[in-house]
Image: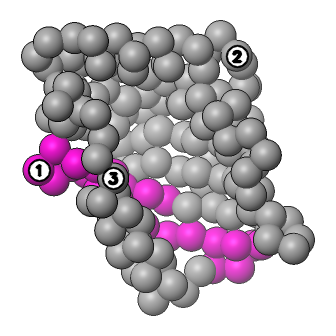
Amino acid sequence: MPQREIDVSMPSAQALGERFERVLTASGPHAIAFTEEELTSYLALGLGDAWLRNPQVWLTSQGVYMRADLTLHQTWQLCLLIRPTTHEGRLRVSLIAGSLGGHAIPRWVLASAESALNDALTDTELPVYIEELVLGEGSAHVTLTPR
């Protein structure tokens, strides 16, 4: 898990939000790139008072590392390594590894959470078709087409 802190800023969150909005009004495929600072800011400012707070997201070619505070009666630090892919224009995730409060999350728990997440992603009708998703060191590139 990377240890560097990612700054959260309203301008970064707004910039990413505006890029996503432009895709919805575009015709045909539209490629956008974003940084881990933009994604972290977008998630941090968009979560509001949710049970998941203070996210930090690191983009690497191996996957997406995420750390956040999970509050359920008490606060625990949740750390995950997520490998996103696409299938038939939809986002799919593989939960590679994780820890909660410094303790490794068992593989069977990760598999169950992965299945539930992918079911939810399948059931959610996103307004875009995901053509391509490429992760790099500190940034990602995605090609989207409005449905």
The residues tagged by marks 3 and 1 sit, at their Cα atoms, a distance apart of 13 Å
The main secondary structure of the magenta stretch is strand
Give the residues in magenta.
81-104
Marks 2,3: beta carbons within 8 A: no
Nearer the observer: mark 2 or 3; the answer is 3
Secondary-structure class at tag 1 = loop
Please report contact status of discs 2 and 1: CB closer than 8 Å, yes or no. no
Q: In this view, does 36 lie above or below 109?
A: above
**Dot label at residue 10:** 2
Name the secondary structure under disc 2.
Answer: helix
Q: Is residue 3 visible?
A: no
Give the residue number, with chain letter if any, for mark 1: 88
Which amino acid does the dot numbered 2 rest on?
Met
Q: Name the residue under label 3.
A: 124
Residue at (70% x, 16% y) in the render? 10
Q: In this view, does 37 lie above or below 90?
A: above
Q: Residue at x 59, y 29 (%)?
A: 42
Q: Which of marks 3 and 1 is nearer the N terminus?
A: 1
- Residue at left offset 60%, top offset 20%: 13
CA gap between label 2 and label 1 equals: 33 Å
Disc number lying in front (3 or 1): 3
Q: Earlier in the sequence, mark 2 or mark 3?
A: 2
Q: What residue type is labelled 3?
A: Thr
Residue 11 sits in quarter: top right
